[in-house]
Image (spheres, rainbow, N blue to C red):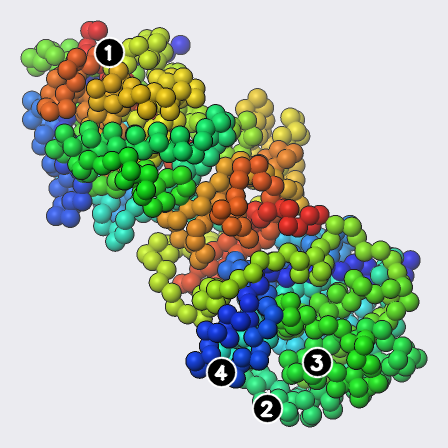
Amino acid sequence: MPTGIRDKVAILGMGCSKFGERWESDASDLMVEAFAEGIKDAGIETKQIDAAWLSTAIEEQHVGKSAVPLATALRLPFIPVTRVENFCASGTEAFRGAVYAVASGAADFALALGVEKLKDTGYGGLPQRGRGTLNNQTWPNLSAPGLFAQLGAAYRAKHDVSRDDLKRAMAHISVKSHDNAARNPKAHLRNRITMDTVLNAPLVADPLGLYDCCGVSDGAACAIVTTPEIARSLGKTDLVSVKALQLSVSNGLEAQHNSWDGSYFHTTRVAARRAYQEAAIEKPRDEISLVEVHDCFSVTELVTLEDLQLSGEGGGIADVLNGFYDADGTIPCQIDGGLKCFGHPIGASGLRMIYEMYLQILGRAGERQRKRTPRLGMTHNLGGFPHQNVCSIAIVGRYGD
Amino acid sequence: MAFGILATGAYIPRLRLQRRAIVDANRWFAPGLSSLGKGERAICNWDEDVITMAVEAARDATIGVDRNDIASLYLASTTFPFLDRLNAGVVAEALCLPEALSALDVASTQRCATSALAHALRGTDSSIVVAAEHRRTRAASAIELNAGDGAAAVVVGEGEPLARLVGRAHSTVDFVDHFRTAESEFDYQWEERWIRDAGYMTIVPPVIARCLAEAGLKASDVNHFCMAAMVPRVVNAVGKTAGIADAVIADSLQALCGDTGAAHPLLLLVAALERAKAGERIMVVGFGQGADALLFEVTGAAAAKGRLGCAGHLARRREETNYSKFLAFNDLIEIERGMRSETDKQTPLSSLWRNRDTVTGMIGGQCSVCGTLQFPITRICVNPNCNAMDTQEPHPFSRKTGRVNSFTADRLTYSPDPPACYGMVQFEEGGRWMMDFTDVEADKLEVGMRMRMMFRIKDVDAQRGFRRYFWKAAPAEAAEGSA
């Protein structure tokens, strides 16, 4: 039984660019913008970084392959730099690489930086990715909303939920995220919206309407990690440490075996179970103070909250509508606006979520700061599709708690 | 045991464009077409062509037939999608016919189907003759109104035949009533009165006479006369000259599906066999640079249960009144397809070859350890309690029905006919796949709906002119028993 990552690594500094339609910026500009904030926060110099990880998913739209773009943009001094890609979980994967490097003793200071420059495609929404030569011959010409919408159908069938009730809960999720982002200067979409706006929006893929889908944004985020001992030696007293980092990847079961009913994320349930064990969390609903989930679509957020055991199975709709996950609720979900409104530059998203947890735990989240300082923050990324995906979970918290 | 026609099948696309819609849209330019505005014509869905229609007709014809017994496949058409790639080869792979098969594409004349059938009937082996046509026509032309898309299939061999050949005759002359070349997109046709008088009336009656003479029969012995002609009333005129009464002239299907070109004589034969009684005689005539006449005697043997045939496919229909959709499906207008349609659809041919059983044959696997069915076949069993390696035996999925587990009508992704409907189809005996749906209406989809597999165009690679095929799920209820 591995001992896990809990409290072995501390976050020394973090940075995050403004997310949005950054017409004026290349990916390299966004990388530097996030890094400038992160390195200043860390209080070290670039040359002290021992190893770095770059996460980016749709590299053909911006920087191209390999880790060279990061090394070049930051003028990293010929250190080991690795590029990772694991769908929308890429950002958390870069973080995992850096954290494991420090935990192994191979690096004192490691950098994880995620970036995505999506607004050079010429059209709205996510660009279509290559799917592999055989998949191109047998998969539908599918889109993310088309597949995530199917969660809605399966969830409704399983829990006997009317379309109206599901739509209302989904609408509440989107309204809440817009409210939260209005208090976040770095967020992409900062306008408030109403339930009516969401419910009356044109359909993208039933039951998902326009406002059930997250924004497609440009942006970058980064973390610099080290050991708690080194962090202390640098004079840091208030430390945020990593409590758990888990990843679960579909092995074809959901896509090919009839044991999965389509109403939940198999990977998320597995990753959550392992993460709680690694972080020694027994009652997540009582112990987690804040959560950022992969709200690529409102229905994803709803289902994920159950898969993370924060709501009971079939209980997500009631919790959402009762405000349990609102900014002033018991466990705020997407207090920074989430993918929905902070934005979703794919490779950066996991790191952006951890960035928000880091700020909230240190009491640095400005206008949107939780009054009762959060103790444990959980982030969740889901890359791919409900029937075939990559799920990453990170739990961070105050070191020593 | 006797040699003859053992089974028949047909396929007529579900969409039926109302001729009134064509006439109304074009009246400003061609008011003379108004008289042709009655009834409906079958039109291919965007994902149908000669190959996909041929596969469906052949599947219909081979219900209850052991496909391993088929030694030859003839595919007849003048509108093959590929000029240099055996179109019949795709059909053979989709039908999982044995590899030792002899296969031919028969083309270049409106009588290619009757010629192929005549050739098959010369042999002693089992063969399947399939004809399909998907004609491109100019907007506001008479042929646009008269033509229809469709396919028919006939299995020939030793067994308990539905009908036996009792007479045959052929003629070949270079009579050019119309033509289409490799360079021309559309038919170019000469004057109808000349085609009637110098063509049909001159060429066909002697061939009929020779055919009857060979059989030792008289014109009055023919109970069903199956002949197609685009020129109005010419079939009756030919019949009159040959001594065949109006009463036995088979309905042209003009009102219900239109003239399916090279496939039409075969389709009329299939339709006639569906209503003929034991002892009756059916004559089928194909015309084009000469003529073929084939005379059959009906035995009265019963057709296979579950086939849809011509009548069943005519009944499986959906009215379409949108002429612009027809033009777009056939690339007759340039519509703005959006940037999402620009995604490269290149098919690596080496990958297609390696995976042909999966992609073209829809062959999955069955684990010999735990029995789990799975699609596609893989090296390691997907059952989480098994995961055995190299235990899967090939298992065909194309004849299975499945149920919709989840679905969507996607308005974001590119589809030639939005919204793109697709979802998880779960096969009743095991196995599942996230797959495209076809021949469905978005508002009719529901979880639990029963679906059958249909062979369709998956993507068109406009950049290279290639098209790839795969199986899609279509509602099973409209096609009970089809396999």
Residue occupied by mark 3: B287
For residue B191, the mark is: 2
User: Which residue of the protein is positioned furthest toward the right in this rendering?
Assistant: B216
- At numbered mark 1, what does the secondary structure look like: helix, strand or loop? loop
Identify the amino acid type marked 3: Phe
- Viewed as shown, does residue B169 lie left or right of A216? right
- Vertical side of A308 occupied by B308: above or below: below
For residue A7, the mark is: 1
Residue occupied by mark 4: B31
Identify the amino acid type marked 1: Asp
- Vertical side of B315 occupied by B134: above or below: below
Give the Cα distance between marks 1 and 3: 85 Å
Question: Which chain contains the residue that carries disc 2?
Answer: B
Circle 1 or circle 4, nearest the eye:
4
Callout 4 environment at 10 Å: few (<14), some (14 to 19), or many (20+)? Answer: few
- Viewed as shown, does residue B187 lie left or right of A66? right
- At numbered mark 4, what does the secondary structure look like: helix, strand or loop? helix
Please report contact status of discs 3 and 4: CB closer than 8 Å, yes or no: no
Which x, y percent locates residue B314?
A: 66, 61
Question: Which chain contains the residue that carries disc 4?
Answer: B
Q: Is residue A50 visible?
A: no
Circle 4 or circle 2, nearest the eye:
4
